[in-house]
Image (cartoon, rainbow, N blue to C red):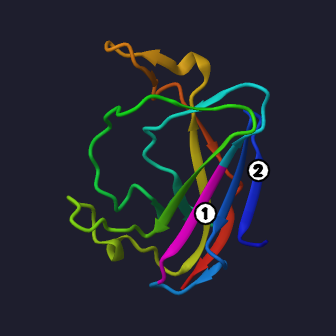
Amino acid sequence: MANRSVRDDPNGFRMTLVVADKLEFGSTEDIRMQLQFENISDRTLRHDSNQTVTFAMSAADGSSEPRWSDADCSPQTGHTMTTGPLELAPGESGSSIGDYPAKVVPGGDGGRDPDSCRLPAGSYLVMGKVDWCPDDAVLTASNGQPYCDPDGVVHVVSAPLTIRIG
């Protein structure tokens, strides 16, 4: 399928990114993205349950602007550790779903107007990301709970998909 990319990362993740059911979108269309990450290694892998960005878009021409991430329009609560690393045994998988520009949570406490986060017409690379927490990045908090050291996580990225907006 043209709206799907699969990448086997050397760290042991198979990253599968699916973007909606097409690759061309009107300027006001919302876009649904799904990332599946599967442990294809022979050891348990951990990912950071506190990661803030899962999906991102950047200009397909390689320029630094414009760009978007799923954290851009979402309410920001600060970088607080809420849970420890999540484990994936060999053969297990996890997934994330996201929406461009963003979904406002009814009764939520903030975030920007999603329409103010829309990108101008153009071609964009869409990528999904999972923050892998290698063994040496798993630390223990003062309460005895494990967490991923934000400075030690490795950003494992899917193969990009090129979409057109507008």
Pointers 2 and 1 in contact (C-beta within 8 Å): no
Say whether residue 65 is visible.
no
Q: Is residue 145 visible?
A: yes
Front residue of 57/91: it is: 91
The residue where tag 2 is placed is 7
Q: Left of 11 or right of it: where is 111?
A: left
Image point (50%, 29%), residue name? 85
Frontmost of labels 2 and 1 is 2
Q: Quadrant of the C terminus?
A: bottom right
Residue 31 is one of the magenta-drawn residues: yes
Could you say whether the residue bearing mark 1 is in a helix, strand or loop? strand
Tell me where residue 62 appears, x and y as whole percent: 62, 61
Residue at 59% x, 61% y is 34
Identified at 28% across, 71% down, the residue is 113
Asked which secondary structure carries label 2, the reply is strand
Which residue is labeled 1 in the image? 126
Q: Which residues are magenta?
A: 29-36
Q: Nearer the viewer, residue 141 or 89?
A: 89
Instruction: Tell me which label, 2 or 1, sits earlier in the chain.
Output: 2
Dividing the picture into quadrants, the one containing residue 13 is: top right
Magenta span contains residue 48: no
Q: CA distance from mark 2 to mark 1?
A: 14 Å
The N terminus sits in image quarter: bottom right
At label 1, which amino acid type do we have? Val
- In the rendered view, does 91 fall on the left or right side of 71? right
